[in-house]
C-alpha cells in the first residue's frame, strides 16, 4: 500500500490532514474479518448469505478490499512507527454487505437484497460511497443483468458514488463485467495489469483488465489505478496478504473519493466522477483500456 499511495500521489492529502474521517463507505463483497486495522470503524455488518450477525469473511477478498480503502495499518508499523500498509483513507467508517460466499461466488438475489438494504439504510449510516469489487459475466441471464444494472443505477440516482471494477477478463473489447458497464457508475481498470501477478495466486495473466467499449458503445473503464500485487489486510485478524485484479484497483479509487468528500463534503457523485476523469494522468493507452488515465489524488485535491 505504501507503493500504491506513491503511484497515485496521496502525499498532499495526508499533509492536509485528510484521511476520510466521518465518511461512510459501503463495501459489497465476501464480508469483513475483525482485523485490528479496522479499529472500531465497522459501523454495520449485514450477511445475505448465511444471515450471521457477527462480522466475518470466509474468503478474504472483502477484507482485503476494505483494507485498501480504510485499513489503519496498525499491524504493519515498522521500527520507526510508520504504518506501511494503511489504506488510502484510513479514517473512513465501513458498512459491509456480505453477498458472496467462501468461494467468492454469489447469486443475483443476494446482491439485489444487499442493494435494497443499502438504499433503505443509507441515511441511517450516512453512506456516501459504494464499492463493488465484484462483477457478473455477460453470459448471465438478460433479466439478471438488467436487474443488477437497474439496482446500481438507482443507487447512483439517489446520490451514492458507486465505484465498480472493470473485471479481469481483458484485454479484448466488451470484456467489462456487469455492473461496470453502467453508463452512470465509475468503472475502474488496473493500470499495472501488464505486469504478471506474482502474488502467489497464479490466476492472473498479463493484460487482464476489462476493456470497452460496451455493447452500447460506452467507453469503459473511466479511470485506472494500481491493481497488481497489492498488499492489504488478510482474514487473519493481524496479517496481510497480496492480491491482484481490478478488485484491488477499485477500492483505491474509492479511497480517493473518500478523501475528496473529506475536503468538500457536498460534492455530488456526478461531480466526483467528472473531477476524477479530468485530473487523471493520460497513460497513452487505448481509451477503451485506460479511459481518462491513471488517478492522481494530488491534482484532484489541488482544485477542490
Image (cartoon, rainbow, N blue to C red):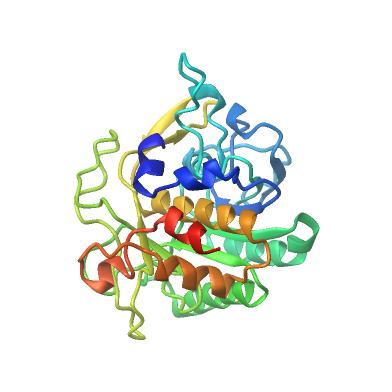
Q: 297 or 95, which lies in front?
A: 297
Residue at the (36%, 71%) spot, across then down: 139
Q: Percent x, y for residue 22?
A: 71, 49
Q: Residue sitting at 69 percent across and 62 percent down?
A: 118
Nearest the viewer among 207 and 57 is 207
Q: Residue 179 location, x and y as percent?
A: 47, 69
Quadrant showing the N terminus: top left
- Rendered position, 295 above or below 39: below
Image quadrant containing the C terminus = bottom right
| x and y, in percent, of residue 84 in the image | 45, 28
Q: Quadrant of residue 286?
A: bottom left
The reply to whether residue 99 is in sight is no
**In the depicted structure, whether residue 168 falls above or below residue 228:** below
Q: Nearer the viewer, residue 257 or 50?
A: 257
Is 286 placed above or below 75 here?
below
* Residue 279 placement: quadrant: bottom left
Please identify the residue farthest to the top as the structure is shown: 79
Residue at position x 53%, y 37% in the image: 58
How many labels, in total? 0
- Extreme residue in the right direction: 124
Q: Nearer the viewer, residue 10 or 71?
A: 10
The percent coordinates of residue 8 (x first, y second) are 38, 50
Using the rendered image of the protein, determine whether residue 11 is visible from the camera's viewpoint: yes
Question: Which residue does the image show at 71% across and 34% down from the upper left?
Answer: 40
Horizontal arrangement in the rendering, residue 47 relative to residue 148 (left or right): right
Amino acid at each position: 500500500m505504501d507503493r500504491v499511495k506513491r503511484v497515485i500521489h496521496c502525499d498532499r492529502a495526508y499533509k492536509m490532514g485528510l484521511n476520510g474521517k466521518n465518511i461512510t463507505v459501503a463495501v459489497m463483497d465476501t464480508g469483513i474479518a475483525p482485523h485490528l486495522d479496522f479499529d472500531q470503524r465497522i459501523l454495520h455488518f449485514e450477511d445475505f448469505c448465511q444471515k450471521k450477525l457477527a462480522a466475518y469473511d470466509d474468503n478474504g477478498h472483502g477484507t482485503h478490499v476494505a483494507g485498501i480503502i480504510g485499513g489503519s495499518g496498525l499491524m504493519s508499523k515498522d521500527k520507526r512507527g510508520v504504518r506501511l500498509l494503511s489504506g488510502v483513507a484510513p479514517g473512513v467508517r465501513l458498512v459491509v454487505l456480505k453477498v458472496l460466499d467462501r468461494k467468492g461466488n454469489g447469486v443475483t438475489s443476494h446482491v439485489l437484497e444487499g442493494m435494497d438494504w443499502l438504499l433503505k439504510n443509507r441515511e441511517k449510516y450516512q453512506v456516501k460511497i459504494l464499492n463493488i469489487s465484484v462483477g457478473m459475466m455477460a453470459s448471465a441471464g438478460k433479466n439478471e443483468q438488467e436487474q443488477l444494472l437497474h439496482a446500481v443505477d438507482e443507487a447512483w440516482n439517489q446520490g451514492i458514488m458507486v465505484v465498480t471494477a472493470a473485471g479481469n477478463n481483458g484485454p479484448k473489447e466488451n470484456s467489462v463485467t456487469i455492473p461496470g458497464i453502467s453508463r452512470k457508475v465509475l468503472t475502474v481498470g488496473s493500470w499495472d495489469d501488464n505486469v504478471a501477478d506474482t502474488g502467489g495466486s497464479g490466476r492472473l495473466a498479463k493484460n487482464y483488465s476489462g476493456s470497452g467499449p460496451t455493447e452500447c458503445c460506452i467507453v469503459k473503464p473511466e479511470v485506472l489505478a494500481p491493481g497488481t500485487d497489492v498488499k492489504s489486510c488478510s482474514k487473519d485478524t493481524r496479517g496481510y496478504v497480496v492480491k491482484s485484479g481490478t478488485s484491488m484497483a477499485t477500492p483505491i479509487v474509492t479511497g480517493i473519493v473518500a478523501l475528496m468528500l473529506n475536503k468538500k463534503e457536498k460534492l455530488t457523485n456526478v461531480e466526483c466522477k467528472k473531477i476524477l476523469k479530468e485530473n487523471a494522468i493520460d497513460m497513452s493507452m487505448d481509451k477503451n483500456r485506460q479511459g481518462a488515465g491513471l488517478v492522481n489524488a494530488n491534482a484532484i485535491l489541488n482544485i477542490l
